[in-house]
Amino acid sequence: MIVHKDTYLVVIGGAEDKKMDKVILKKLVELSNKKDPRFVLITTATQQPEEAGEQYKKVFKSLGIETTIVLNIENRDDANDDEINGQMLKGDCIFFTGGDQLRISSILGGTKIHENLHKAVDLGKVIAGTSAGASMMSEIMVVEGVDKEAPSRCTIKMAPGMGLIEGVIIDQHFNQRGRIGRLLSAIAQNPHSLGIGIDENTAIILDNKGEFQVAGSGVVTVIDGRSITFTNTCEQYPNEPLAITEVKLHVLPSGYGYSLAKKYPIIKTEFCNNKKKNEKAAQ
Amino acid sequence: MIVHKDTYLVVIGGAEDKKMDKVILKKLVELSNKKDPRFVLITTATQQPEEAGEQYKKVFKSLGIETTIVLNIENRDDANDDEINGQMLKGDCIFFTGGDQLRISSILGGTKIHENLHKAVDLGKVIAGTSAGASMMSEIMVVEGVDKEAPSRCTIKMAPGMGLIEGVIIDQHFNQRGRIGRLLSAIAQNPHSLGIGIDENTAIILDNKGEFQVAGSGVVTVIDGRSITFTNTCEQYPNEPLAITEVKLHVLPSGYGYSLAKKYPIIKTEFCNNKKKNEKAAQ
């Protein structure tokens, strides 16, 4: 849970625009809310850390960021190194690139970097991640799953993420890779978790009220499984397709949002002047 | 609406198995429920009618069907031809191949074949269609739409179908082509219609009680928009992504079903001995 009023978690569904209007990356600069904010880029997820480092340095520079420190933490020793940890904590915005979310969790999980990442949340920093860097934000992350398939138990594998956001399972490249099936599978296994499917060039920005707002060109699909009346997930053979009834879905484009704390969608203010109406509808 | 107790509409999401266990095509033979049933194949949707004709003739023969009449109705004159209409009505099972659903509606719509197709429903026949032949079954069909995209108004075009099933919009190749976005767009425009997304090698079998059962290897996704509390569909610019809140979703594999008449999912009897429990939950 975010307590500090200046902390924002920015969770990006991958392929954020780096050439045109850069809406999402601009938001990071804006949220850092400081003269000359310092950016830290963590390239652990990717196996091309140098290319990724150069690319983001250039983009951030084009947005006025003078200092981007690239930390390519490739092993658990580095992740426990005091100097590297100190450098991370100097960042006003800490950004995780894409790649493989299992690299992030297996290299950083349970190290000082992991601990300091939680500390960074309490210190009022902006923590952002794209693609694999998005998935790792939640307590449970989808690490493998067949795209464009009917939901079935064997199509997904999950693993513990870095736990910055509680009670959610995040999936990325959502509509672009046809991932509704795999996220539904994940939610059916424990409908207590909320599924958040984030499109490419789209992000959620989570604040200390437990509310997120959507930014970017796609949509965020929220899957609320609390209303599920039936699922065969515990009875079926792993290869058979899942049955799920009465799942609730919200589709939220830029400017719309969702309260993770209270579990209701927030309508863009242009269309609805207060949240009360909607809050009521969600009850 | 189906009145005759022997009538079944079999709506297939495309790419039904024609080589292995042929579960769905076998169902057609079984449902025809007659010694030596006569099959009629209508190839209007495809621009390779001869290949399609040969292929299905062979498959049906392998399932014991001695007579498959191929009707390649390529223009409206043929669609109004009495002899061709007579031949169609002699079929115990009338099967529409895949291709382009606009070919079916533009060539057959408002002709005698269209009229006789409705008559066939009243005569206790089995009417089946795959892919384009599935989409055309509903009153409104999706004719164009970008796959694997966030829902947005301009991503879909709809047109009137052949109207054999009322109050639904059917989409096919559903999970395989990542079509949840386009079906959500369609439903947001009028939440009165129920969205039915059918996977490849998967079918719904609709009977005269207004209930369908799922067959095949994938799932059927039912989108019930009646619960939608908000959508920006009438306010947004056509290119912008849609907002939709509180959509209800059901995912139904083989053996499960749905009552179109009463709008609730039907759980496979192995898992639940009566429908009442579920009926209650849907209220």
Image (cartoon, coloured by chain):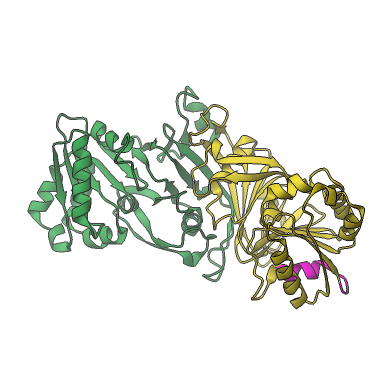
Chain colours: A yellow, B green
Quadrant of the image containing the C terminus of chain B: top right
Q: Is residue B190 magenta?
A: no
Residue B53 position in % (x across, y down)? 19, 50
Q: Main secondary structure of the magenta part?
A: helix
Is A127 placed left or right of B194 in the picture?
right
Residue B105 position in % (x across, y down)? 27, 59
Q: State the residue at coordinates (14%, 32%).
A: B36
Q: State the residue at coordinates (55%, 48%).
A: A180
Quadrant of the image containing the N terminus of chain B: top left
Is B248 placed left or right of B86 in the picture?
right
For this rendering, which residue is in front, B111 or B256?
A: B256
Residue B58 position in % (x across, y down)? 19, 42
- Vertical arrangement, residue A112 with respect to residue B142, above or below: above
Q: State the residue at coordinates (88%, 74%).
A: A35
- Vertical arrangement, residue A154 with respect to residue A106, above or below: above
Look at the image and tell me whether residue A3 can be seen: no
For this rendering, which residue is in front, B283 or A106?
A: A106
Furthest residue to the left? Answer: B83
Residue A141 position in % (x across, y down)? 68, 45
**Quadrant of res A267:** bottom right
Is A9 placed left or right of A86 in the picture?
left
Look at the image and tell me whether residue A170 can be seen: yes
Q: Which residues are magenta?
A: A25-36
